[in-house]
Image (cartoon, rainbow, N blue to C red):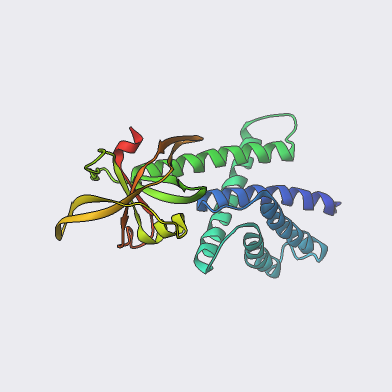
Amino acid sequence: MYYELYIDVVFLENLILDYLLLGLVGKCLTCSSGRLRKLWGATVGSIGVCMLYLFSLQETPAGNLLVYVIFSTAMVKAGLDLKGWRPLGKALALLYLNTFLLGGIVQWMQRYLRFPVYPFLGLSLVSFWILSWGMGWLMRFRGRKAGFLKVTLKYHGRSLKLQGLLDTGNHLRDPYFGKPVSVITEALQKELCAGEEVLFLQVPFHSIGKQDGLMPAFFADILCVETGEGEGKQTHRPLIGITKEPLSSKNEYQILLHPDLLE
């Protein structure tokens, strides 16, 4: 008994699956990669799988090593904007996890949804949508639970995309206008303002170890906080305080948000 193998079909099927998987991994890691880059990464992975079939290595230990280590690493490096070994290791772990989950959803659909035909592309896209929705819901739930929100801060045509922490204990307001004050580091302020002269206000504050102090603050153009899927709350002329101390030792967030900004 033998099977006819069409290498172009193998290439196309793996290209589609690898592209979808790279999209899921990128979403989990919140790393930005364009469609062309993900397509290039998927092409690298698909070529690798085709090489296994061409040299009859698909069921051998050497073939498994090539697929799960060499080709997977090359695909992730080519398809996603990752810097350093640690993000690469996370991306590979997520790639294996999403591959397992995507295959499980496809098998479940084939078993319980008794359609007369199971077109590969349709099943793959529906499975991808289910998994993507589940991953997105889990990430939003985790982010809300931790108080983390995606923030875009704009000033004179420049913008920073930041991870924000909703600080419910932040009651800092300026004494002149009563505007709520969010806080970023001095390094981020310099990056956003790019050397421009900025007019600072001095905002009084109290903190542990320092009863009274003055925090410099400036008016940015727009602060946009993502509050849900495709939704955001914009604040025009937000007041941004500047601190020389790091906000998070592990850089989990880069801006402390005043809770009144979401009301």
The number of numbered discs placed on residues in the rendered structure image is: 0
Report x, y in % for residue 67.
Answer: 67, 63
Q: Nearer the viewer, residue 217 or 200?
A: 200
Within the image, what quadrant is residue 173 found in?
A: top left
Q: Residue at x 67, y 55 (%)?
A: 37
Q: Is residue 149 left or right of residue 169?
A: right
Report x, y in % for residue 204.
Answer: 20, 50
Report x, y in % for residue 136.
Answer: 50, 41
Q: Nearer the viewer, residue 234 or 147?
A: 234
Q: Nearer the viewer, residue 154 or 143?
A: 154
Q: Residue at x 32, y 52 (%)?
A: 200
Q: Residue at x 15, y 61 (%)?
A: 209
Quadrant where the image shows the C terminus: top left
Q: Nearer the viewer, residue 103 or 217?
A: 217
Within the image, what quadrant is residue 237 found in?
A: top left
Q: Quick check: can you spot residue 3?
A: no
Within the image, what quadrant is residue 46 found in?
A: bottom right
Pick out the residue farthest to the left. 211
Q: Is residue 140 above or below residue 159?
A: above
Q: Is residue 11 left or right of residue 167?
A: right
Q: Is residue 159 above or below residue 89?
A: above
Q: Quick check: can you spot residue 48?
A: yes
Q: Is residue 158 left or right of residue 211?
A: right
Q: Residue at x 68, y 38 (%)?
A: 123
Report x, y in % for residue 15.
Answer: 73, 51
